[in-house]
Image (cartoon, helix red, strand yellow):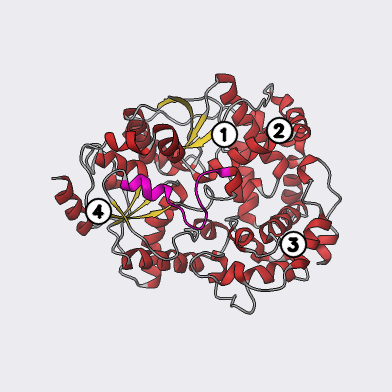
Amino acid sequence: MGALEEKPEPGGALERGNEPKTLKIMAEICFKCGVCCVIRDHSCHAQLDAQFNPRQTYVYDCLGSGDPAGNQNIWLCVSCHKCEELCPYEVSPIHVIESLKAQSFEEGRAHPMIVGEIKQIVSTGYAFPLTGASSRQREKLGLAALTQGSEEDLKRISEKTGLVAKLQRYEEAEK
Amino acid sequence: MRFSLFLGCFIPVRLPHIEKVARSVLGEIGVELQDMDGFTCCPEPVGFHINDKLTATAIAARNIALAEERGDDIITLCNGCTYVLKQVNEELKGDPDLKDEINEVLAETDHEYRGTIEVKHFAQVLNEDIGLDRLAKKVERPLSGLRVAGHTGCHILSPPDVMKFDDPFDPVVLDNLVAALGAEPADFSMKTICCGWTLTNYGDRQSANQLVGAKLQAMEAAGSDCISVICPQCFYQFDTGQMMAARSLKLDLKLPVLFYLQLLGLSMGHSLDDIHYGQHRVKSPVFEEKLGRILA
C-alpha cells in the first residue's frame, strides 16, 4: 500500500473522508471473503475479465498491488458501487480505486482515453466530438443544431482549479 | 410540470433520434421541457468526475446554477448525467464549506450555485411526479403479451441514499413502468450487472463483448421479446455493442433494445417509424411481427 501512503495530504473540503489514512485502513480491513466479486448475478462486472478468478479477484488486484496507482486495471472499474454495497465490512473498494485513479491522473499516469476525454470536455463542452454525421442526422430529424459557447467559462474554471496546468504536463510528457 | 431539459452529450451527439422521441413523448404526457443555453457536459462521471473532482464539481455546479437562474428543476435523460448532477447537488447542499470553495471557482464565470433546485431523471419524474396510474391512462394501445427485459443500469441505482431511485439489488421501478404500459416485465439473471459500455472505452473490448453477450443470453433465456433501458450508454451497448458482441463471439443475437420513452410512445399510438426504430443497429423481424399483432 506504499502509493496510498504517499498520496499528498488533503487540500480542500472535497478530500474530507477520503484521507489517505482512512483509505489505507479501509483497504486493510479486507479479509478476502470475495463477496464483492464472485456473486455472478450481483457483483463486480470487471471480475468477468479473463485475468481474474475467485482466488485472485479484481478487487484484491486493485487493493493489493505494489504500485496501485500504476496498476492499469484500476481503469476497469466503472463506479457501479456493487463492491461497496455487497461488502460485509466497510472496505468500500470503490473509494480506494477512485482515489487511486485520481492519484494516477495527478501524477500524469492516467489512461490516455481519460486524458483525451477531459481535454475534449473542457475545450468544447461536449464529451464527444460534434461530427458532420450527427449534424446531418439532427437536421434530418428537425432538431436544432448543437451550439457551443461555454468554452470560456470552462477555461476559466479549469485554470482556477489547476486542471489546465495538469493537462499541460501531459502534453509536455508527450513531446 | 415544467423542467429545464438537460440533454447531456451522448443523446444529442450520438443518438439524436432518442432526443426527438423524448421531446415528443414527454411533451404529450404533460412534461414541459425548457431548453437552456449554456449547459455543458455534466461532466462525465467515470472519465472526469472521479479523476479531477474539484473541476468536475465546479462544472456540474455551473450547470445547476444555470437552471437555478431560470428557476425550474432539471430533468435528465441519462443515468450518468443524473449520477454526477445529483451527487454534486446533494454534496453542495450538505456542505457549506465545499459550497463556498466551489462558488469561489464559479466566481470566475459570474455564476453562483445556491442549492435551490432538484435534479431528476425522467424515469423518476414518470414514477413519482406523473405516477403509474396517470401514466397507464395515457396508454392507447396496451402492449399486452410483449415480454420486456428491463435493464435499469448502474448509476441511477447507486449510491442509493443519494440517487433515491430504486433498490440496487432488486430494482422494480423500470419493471413497474413497463407493466404500466400493459407489457410483461421479464425476470432474468445478471439483471443488475453493468452493461459494460464503460469497459469498451477504458478497458478491454473483449471482456465487454463477453459481458453484454452473457446478459443478452440471460435475457433471451427468460423469453424476452426486447430490452428496455433508461440510459443512452446502456442503449448503445445493447444496440451497437450487441452487434459487435454477436460478431466477435459468433452468437446469433437479435434482441432489439428500446429506450423506455420509445416503448411509451408505441403504447401511446406511435408507430415504429415514429419512434425511429429504423435507426437501430439491431432489428428483429420476430419482434416486429409480434409487436404488429399486439398493436393491430
Residue denoted by label 3:
A69
Marks 3/1 in contact by CB < 8 Å: the verdict is: no
- Whole-angstrom CA distance, mark 3 to mark 1, is 30 Å
- Neighbourhood count class around disc 4 (C-alpha, 10 Å): few under 14, some 14–19, many 20 upward: many
Numbered label attached to residue B40? 1
- Whole-angstrom CA distance, mark 4 to mark 1, is 38 Å
* Percent coordinates x, y for residue B256 in the rendering: 31, 55
Q: Quadrant of the C terminus of chain B?
A: top left
Q: Quadrant of residue B108?
A: top right
Chain ID for label 1? B
Check residue B176 for magenta coloring.
yes
Do marks 4 and 1 share a chain?
Answer: yes
What kind of residue is marked 4? Leu
Q: Is residue B246 above or below residue B62?
A: below
Secondary element at image label 4: loop
Chain ID for label 2? A
Part of the protein shown in magenta: B163-179
Do marks 2 and 1 share a chain?
Answer: no
Secondary element at image label 2: helix
- Whole-angstrom CA distance, mark 3 to mark 4, is 47 Å
- Who's the residue at 33% across and 33% down the image? B134
- Whole-angstrom CA distance, mark 2 to mark 4, is 49 Å
